[in-house]
Amino acid sequence: MTSAPLEQYLMLSAVLFGIGTAGVFVRRNLITILLSIEIMLNAVNLAFVAFGRMYGRADGQIIVFFVMTVAAAEAAVGLAIVISLFRHRESLNPDSFTELKW
Amino acid sequence: MFYAFATVAVVASLLVIAQRNPIYSVLLLIASFGALSGLYVLLEAPFVAVIQIIVYAGAIMVLFLFVVMLLNAPHEDTDFDERTHPLLRPGPMRLGGLLAVALVLELVWALAAGAGAGRFGIGSVTSVAAIGRMLFTDYAFAFEVTSVLILVAMVGAVVLARKEGGQ
């Protein structure tokens, strides 16, 4: 059923991870940065599932389960921080949050 | 089939970081997750494909969408984003973009240089029962710790998003 070999899945995973990295660096919007982090997490998930399929074991899929849990926790806390910051500054640009305390 | 899903995933992800409006970004990311879910089906991991759709596209992305609409700040509010070309922006952004490209090139180069022994084997674990049994035996401790993590995240989110001063 799977026509593509492992390398192509890993290359796709690398490309997606690079897109996520570029998004974190290039974009100046907190929500888009969080979305880029989700892209990176999904790239890693794809690599885990591909390796798990390679070795015929379920461990890859179980790690993906845990990564998704951590991603959910990260999204909840990250979005709460975004809401709290937006309430203070009316802005989503990370460059406007340069002070440690206000 | 692989190439169709891979193309959709890459194009949608690129558009996610190219969009100016976060709502479109979130919707495109859902499309990207759908394509990834198809790839998981190709990899004979139906459980992961299903929770990718239900948990990721269904729950986490709706949370994002909810916050985007709640904040009601659809446009990126930096002035120079409107004025300047992406390649003419200040140092860290250009450098970061270059770093990302370098990372991809390096990873692809390393993959291409490695031995091409990547044919998938015959056996694969597809049944949810097998995964669940493993989750509650070999990974039972990690599973329990995960529940604590979720609790901490929930309390943290409530505390952080609470209005200050309001009791």
Image (cartoon, helix red, strand yellow):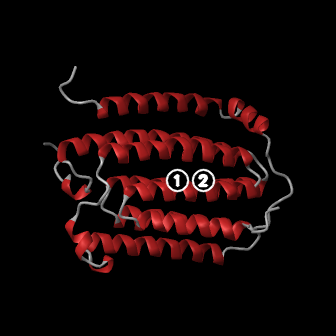
Q: Position of residue B52 (x, y in %)?
A: 61, 47
Q: Where is the C terminus of chain B found, in terms of image quarters? A: top left
Q: Residue furthest left?
A: A102
Residue B109 vs B70, above or below: the answer is below
Q: Residue furthest right?
A: B122
Q: Position of residue B128 (x, y in %)?
A: 76, 38
Compare residues B11 and A53 and report the one nearer the observer. B11
Q: Position of residue A33 (x, y in %)?
A: 38, 56
Left or right of B74 on screen, residue B54: right
**Residue in the picture at 85% in, 52% down:** B123
Q: Quadrant of residue A77?
A: top left
Compare residues B38 and B119 and report the one nearer the observer. B38
Q: Position of residue A71 (x, y in %)?
A: 49, 44
**Residue in the picture at 51% in, 63% down:** A17
Asked if the residues shown at circle 1 and circle 2 are in contact, with their CB atoms under 8 angstroms apart, the answer is yes
Residue B116 vs B142, above or below: the answer is below
| Chain letter belonging to callout 2 | A
Q: Residue furthest top?
A: B167
The disc label shown at residue A45, or none: 2
**Residue in the picture at 69% in, 54% down:** B40
Residue where numbered disc 1 is placed: A41
Q: Quadrant of residue B54?
A: top right
Tell me the kind of residue under disc 1: Leu
The disc label shown at residue B150, or none: none
Crowd band around label 2 with a 10 angstrom C-alpha radius: few (<14), some (14–19), many (20+): many
Q: Where is the N terminus of chain B found, in terms of image quarters? A: bottom right
Tell me the kind of residue under disc 2: Asn
Secondary element at image label 2 = helix
